[in-house]
């Protein structure tokens, strides 16, 4: 909990560099890019050397000859480009997966990071609440000689003081587990420090006017559309559609005959027939495959591409539904928390402060009992801690929405840079010091 702040963007930046999940997807892209160098090249020529009409006793015959030949496979205009386009489309379909791996890390890490943030803010408030208890202990101790206070009252306040210490200890121990889990997720050393910067809950908000909406789902459709435009997984799915279409275009060339032009030179041996001695021959021609079954291959490739497009469209629609569900859940929580925070901050806590002040004033002049003041103090502690916890949750849900729609890194970086330059402090709750 001590040391320099650790912005969320800094944690993610460290994780991206060497995280196995990101490295694996980056390697997949590199594999596809490496394939590009070997696709769409002109086919190599073939050379041949053969002996013809050689008798079993290897004696020379007028029909014997040595043949030296060369052949060159031909290609149809656009065929090589189509093959290269297919591999290029497959490579482009994998590229957004690297960015999506980062987004997935962010989404998983946001909840843990802001749970640590919530613990830190709760501990701060609990530490602040120990000061008035120390003051009342001093007050009661001074009154013991006059009989206006008792040792039992002092011990009750000390018990309240120790209760706060116990709650702080439980939070600190829980924090250690959250930090270890976050470090494990981001592939950092287990004991690496994590100290979220102090910031007001409204620093990072996904809404256009930077304030909580009046209705729970007011910006749901807009946020979903922003997510569909920003999330790399959607770009990857769209690229996969292009890859499937490119594969179908490349497959159509299977329906074309495979052509090959060839030529060879025959060197004749001397034999018994003087008419044939010393006569060499040159041959040239063209060969072609018979694409009898290639049409079926082409049709099958086109059917596969069509099925892939249908599947990808369904995956995109499924992602939209799932994204909408998650954002709607976050927005509902935001609206619920905002209502509670407003009520507690503007109504409950001010009233609890008035009750405590009245009890304290009565205690000062001996007109109020000690138990009433203690109950008022305990209630105020509960309300202040709960308010801080809910404000931290409000911030977490806002940031989670930004992570879900793929807009988190840039905004976090800008907001936290401003926060570190001009540190903000929790909103004063008006409690006694």
Image (cartoon, grey):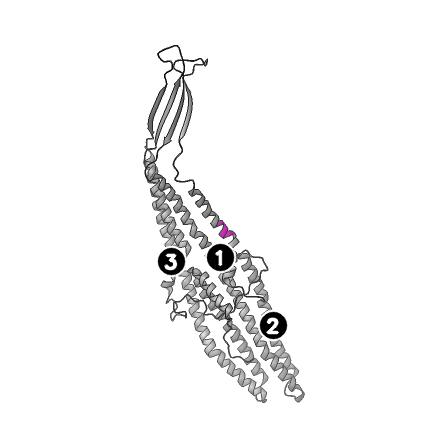
Viewport quadrant of the C terminus: bottom right
Is residue 255 placed above or below 325 in the rendered structure? Answer: above
Q: Which of marks 1 and 3 is nearer the N terminus?
A: 1
Q: Which mark is residue 87?
A: none
Q: Where is residue 428 in the image (x, y as percent from the top left)?
A: 51, 77
Q: Can residue 301 be seen in this view?
A: no
Viewport quadrant of the N terminus: bottom right
Q: Position of residue 92 (x, y in %)?
A: 40, 49
Contact check, label 1 and label 3, Cβ < 8 Å: no
Give the residue drawn at x 44%, y 64%: 411
Q: Dividing the picture into quarters, in which one does residue 232 lie?
A: bottom left
Q: Is residue 248 magenta?
A: no
Question: Which is more foreground, mark 2 or mark 1?
Answer: 1
Residue position for label 2: 165
Q: Main secondary structure of the magenta part?
A: helix
Judging from the image, what secondary structure is the residue with disc 1 in?
Answer: helix
Q: Position of residue 301 (x, y in %)?
A: 35, 41
Q: Earlier in the sequence, mark 3 or mark 2?
A: 2
Provide the residue span drawn in magenta.
Answer: 20-24
Q: Which of marks 2 and 1 is nearer the N terminus?
A: 1
Give the residue drawn at x 49%, y 78%: 349
Residue position for label 1: 105
Judging from the image, what secondary structure is the residue with disc 3 in?
Answer: helix
Q: Does the magenta stretch include residue 22?
A: yes
Residue position for label 3: 229
Q: Where is residue 410 in the image (x, y as percent from the top left)?
A: 45, 62
């Amino acid at each position: 909990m001590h040391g320099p702040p650790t912005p969320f963007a800094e944690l993610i930046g460290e994780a991206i560099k060497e995280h196995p999940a990101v490295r694996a997807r980056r390697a997949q892209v590199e594999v596809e890019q490496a394939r590009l160098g070997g696709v769409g090249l002109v086919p190599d020529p073939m050379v041949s050397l053969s002996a013809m009409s050689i008798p079993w006793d290897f004696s020379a015959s007028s029909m014997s000859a040595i043949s030296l030949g060369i052949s060159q496979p031909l290609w149809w205009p656009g065929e090589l480009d189509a093959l290269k386009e297919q591999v290029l489309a497959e490579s482009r379909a994998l590229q957004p997966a690297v960015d999506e791996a980062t987004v997935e890390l962010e989404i998983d890490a946001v909840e843990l990071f802001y749970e640590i943030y919530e613990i830190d803010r709760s501990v701060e408030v609990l530490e602040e609440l120990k000061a008035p208890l120390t003051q009342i202990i001093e007050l009661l101790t001074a009154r013991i000689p006059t009989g206006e206070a008792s040792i039992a009252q002092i011990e009750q306040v000390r018990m309240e003081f120790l209760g706060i210490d116990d709650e702080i200890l439980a939070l600190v121990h829980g924090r250690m587990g959250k930090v270890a889990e976050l470090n494990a997720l981001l592939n950092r050393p287990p004991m690496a420090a994590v100290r979220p910067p102090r910031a007001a809950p409204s620093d990072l908000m996904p809404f256009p006017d930077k304030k909580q909406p009046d209705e729970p789902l007011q910006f749901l459709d807009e946020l979903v559309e922003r997510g569909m435009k920003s999330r790399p997984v959607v770009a990857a799915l769209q690229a996969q559609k292009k890859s499937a279409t490119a594969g179908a275009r490349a497959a159509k060339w299977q329906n074309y005959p495979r052509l090959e032009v060839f030529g060879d030179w025959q060197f004749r041996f001397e034999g018994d027939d003087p008419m044939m001695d010393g006569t060499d021959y040159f041959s040239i021609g063209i060969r072609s495959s018979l694409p009898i079954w290639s049409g079926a291959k082409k049709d099958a490739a086109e059917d596969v591409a069509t099925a892939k497009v249908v599947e990808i469209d369904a995956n995109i629609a499924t992602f939209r539904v799932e994204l909408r569900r998650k954002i709607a859940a976050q927005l509902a929580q935001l609206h619920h928390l905002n209502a509670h925070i407003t009520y507690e901050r503007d109504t409950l806590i001010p009233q609890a402060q008035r009750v405590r002040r009245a009890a304290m004033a009565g205690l000062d002049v001996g007109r109020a009992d000690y138990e009433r003041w203690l109950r008022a103090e305990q209630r105020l502690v509960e309300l202040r801690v709960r308010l801080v916890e809910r404000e931290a949750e409000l911030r977490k849900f806002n940031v989670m929405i930004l992570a879900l729609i793929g807009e988190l890194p840039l905004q976090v970086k800008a907001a936290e840079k401003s926060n570190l330059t001009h540190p903000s402090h929790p909103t004063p709750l008006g409690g006694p010091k």
